[in-house]
Amino acid sequence: MPRLVIDGKTVVAKEGTFLLQAAREAGIDIPTLCEHPAVEPYGGCRMCLVDVTRPEWDGWSKMVVSCLFPVEDGIIVSTKSERVMNTRRVVIDLLLARCPNTPLVQKMAAEYGIEKTSYVQNPEPTDCILCGLCTRVCDEMGTSAISSSSRGAGREIAPPFNEPPPDCIGCLACAEICPTGFIKYETSNSKRVIWNKEFEMLRCPTCGRGHITKAQAAWHDGKVPGRYFEQCDACKRKAQAAMAVTLMGGSQIR
Amino acid sequence: MDRIYRVIPERCIACGKCELACAFAHGGEGKPGVSRISIHRRGPDLGVPIVCLQCDDAACVAVCPVHALSRNEATGAIEVDYGKCVNCRMCVAACPFGNMLWDETWHCVAKCDLCHGAPKCVPFCPTGALEYIPADRAGRTPEKVAPGVLRSELIASRP
């Protein structure tokens, strides 16, 4: 079990974990924007940068992203050194230039004492911080319908060729995980629209509520019998109660 | 898992205390959560409590793409790891009994977690329709089935 020092606190971490996880388990908070326990670490937001050194390095240290740095025995980590804070300030300053109207970015900038960006503000403000959570959760769902496209300043999250993504099943996992609410969708009992793709809903034969898309039911068919998806949850509970009443020999549920 | 959660629907008087206890036990900041147990009323004072069965081979666990649902070996309940859950709600659609719920107030999925070993609904049930008892006492003699049911089953089984 590797023993390391984080902010002066001796921490015994589990073998094979990353620095961010070890620090959080020890109660030391490191800010992140692209981290989520459900998906693989990505190292995209650069907010979790920390300083790593060893006694034999004669005062030299290196900056690493803690979400991707495996714990090592004997390292000394500082999460709030002047160098770390300055680098995070640059990162959040750049993000504020890109997304000046996003509450999440504004809040984080305020925490680091930045009110207005020192860079040229993006003429077309966006809410997307390019954290990649949506694309990674889409990979996790097994669909991989969206990805990041283009490079540099023009980089964006988009379906292939900016057309309705053929592999999307309309599960809304990308919209739900998005920390800034950038991914928009519309859903009703009859249809759902996300990424400009229209989905037909699977409607409960009893109450008519459209609870999932037909594409979702088809995608998950096989993991569980497909008929499980037919009714909505409320009608399934009702059916269960009705069956219990029949078994008791009572009158039907009203 | 030395205790079993048992529901005896014959004893339910549809008072709704379990629903309230559950909603407040799973809420916070003055906002109740969705009740994991629901009573289906079949008369002014007769009801059937419907609650998660904690299936051995559970559909919710099978469909979860991020493995956020797992069994707590101490209590036997399947619990949601809210840190991992991505709110895709496939479990809500997949549960064949409809016992996986969507909590609109807290914007998360919800299921009975047996309150980590001390179900809050049980002490509130005035008639003993809900019990949390040692596993070796959980078996019970089947109660008398009405003749009408047997007849209808017989008719249904005919080719």
Image: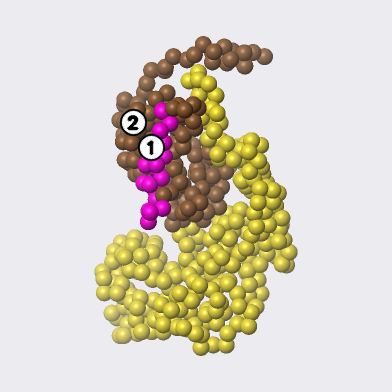
Image-quadrant location for residue A10: bottom left
Tell me which residue sits at (41%, 82%) in the image. Answer: A113
Callout 2 touching callout 1 (CB < 8 Å): yes
Residue A233 higher or lower than A54, as above or below? above
Q: Secondary structure at mark 2?
A: loop
Tell me which residue sits at (36%, 84%) in the image. Answer: A82
Q: Which residue is mark 2?
A: B126
Bounds of the magenta segment: B12-31
The reply, left or right, for residue B149 in relation to residue B130 is right
| Distance of label 2 from label 1 (alpha carbons) | 8 Å
Residue A71 seen from this side = no
The mark found on residue B17 in the picture is 1
Residue B116 seen from this side = yes
Q: Secondary structure at mark 1?
A: helix
Residue A44 higher or lower than A235, as above or below? below
The reply, left or right, for residue B137 in relation to residue A130 is left
Nearest to the observer: residue A10 or residue B77: B77
- Colour brown belongs to chain: B
Magenta-span inclusion, residue B28: yes
- Image quadrant in which the N terminus of chain B is located: top left
| Chain identity of mark 2 | B
Point out residue B123 in the picture as x, y percentages from the top left corner: 31, 36
At label 1, the amino acid type is: Lys
Nearest to the observer: residue A127 or residue B33: B33
